[in-house]
Amino acid sequence: MEYLSDRIKSLSVSATLAMAQKSRELKARGIDVIDLSLGEPDFDTPDDVKAAAKQAIDDNYSKYPPVPGYGDLREAISKKFKEENGLNYTADQIIVSAGGKHSLINVILSIVNPGDEVIILAPYWVSYYDQILIAQGRPVIVEAAIENDFKINPRDLEAAITPKTRLIIFNSPSNPTGMVYSREEMEKIALIVHKHEGLFIISDEIYEHITFTGKHESMASFDFIYDRVITVNGVSKSYAMTGWRIGYIGAPLWIAKACNKLQGQFTSGVCSIAQRAALAAIQSKSDSRERMKDAFLRRRNLICGLLSSVRGLKVKVPQGAFYVMPDITFYLGKSDGTITIKDSDELALYLLDKARVALVGGTAFGAPKCIRISYAASDENIKEAVNRIKSALDRLI
């Protein structure tokens, strides 16, 4: 008999990782599947970063690192925050963790008590919801419509706040929609936070360098809420370093100390070699970030142009990241004679089965009438994938 905790039984399996696993299993059986499910750049880690990791091995970076991260890495992150974001975080206010996901759960577990409410803005990244459950908090969803570019109405946010609200999780550029909030739109949210004492906001900025319109803005740059913002970032997306597992926060000192305390009991300091690679990435003078962004912009234009010709899909052109999230309401209730589509998750499984294209249904993102497509793929795969999707959807009547 299994004696699992209520905590683990309450969690969902990550929808993105589950679909990626299905894709891998089919590929292992020799089936030609185009995987557009994972949020992972399809580029290699830059050569100067890889060289730094190799040098770190030769330099014997093989001992336990400091729990919050090496001092020179945190100093480099502090400088990055200052120069790129206009944020003053000292090295003591920075904690380096095993990826952005680890950074997020550190913060949530440090400030959310059982029964506290945490507001997430739908569509949202899949792990926000379950991380709140791990902390025994209560997720409160504020929905944004595709007609409003998947951006919330500030009045809806204000209406969702109660005396039990402890935290808001904000993400721009967004996974899964690719939308980017303007400074004016962010200021309206910042002013709402400012009105409510004891309310904090996590600003997940992991996609900051993949912004196609305007300039990336950091929530903590509004000085009147600086001491209530926790900025989460990392090297995974900007430097094609997903597997190196390095994320970090800039936060009020008392929150940074709490995360340091928690991390000391969970993981201690994260991989020493990966930290040396992250230092090289953050200090790099190469143009790898710009080249990746240019490629993603080209692919965005390609996939949105192709999707616009697919019957029934409603597409908003994303402003950042590398996702597009079409509304698939047109296909709900339609059938190919064997399968009737009830929701977006079923449509995603249908496309995996009939089109051999892996993408992710929107339910786990708080958007059950949408699907998420990652265009972190070659131009050829994008073209072929949309052709397959179109052919499979044409069979639904």
Image (cartoon, rainbow, N blue to C red):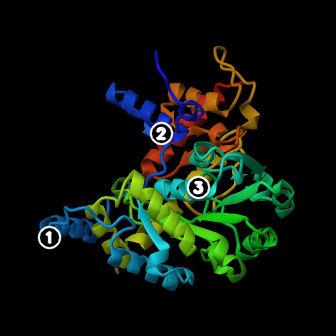
Residue 322, percent across and down?
53, 56
In-front residue for pair 211/170: 170
Quadrant hosting residue 25: top left
In-front residue for pair 361/305: 361
Above or below, 84 against 50 in this view is below
Q: Is residue 184 visible?
A: yes
Q: Amino acid at mark 2?
A: Leu
Q: Which mark is residue 108?
A: 3
Residue 329, given in percent of the width and then of the height, sits at 75, 36
**Residue 99 visible in the displayed image:** no
Looking at the image, tell me whether mark 3 or mark 1 is earlier in sequence order. 1
Please tell me which of labels 1 and 2 falls first in the chain. Answer: 2
Residue 308, how many percent across, how many down?
Answer: 66, 48
Residue named by callout 1: 59
Which residue type does callout 1 highlight?
Asp
Q: Name which quarter of the figure residue 348 lies in.
A: top right
Horizontal side, residue 222 vs residue 53: left or right: right
Q: Name the secondary structure under disc 2.
A: helix
Give the residue at mark 2: 17
**For the residue labelled by badge 1, is the local secondary structure a helix, a strand or a loop?**
loop
Instruction: Say whether disc 2 or disc 3 marks the residue closer to the N-terminus.
Output: 2
Tag 1 and tag 2, C-beta contact below 8 Å: no
- Residue drawn at (60%, 36%) of the image: 390
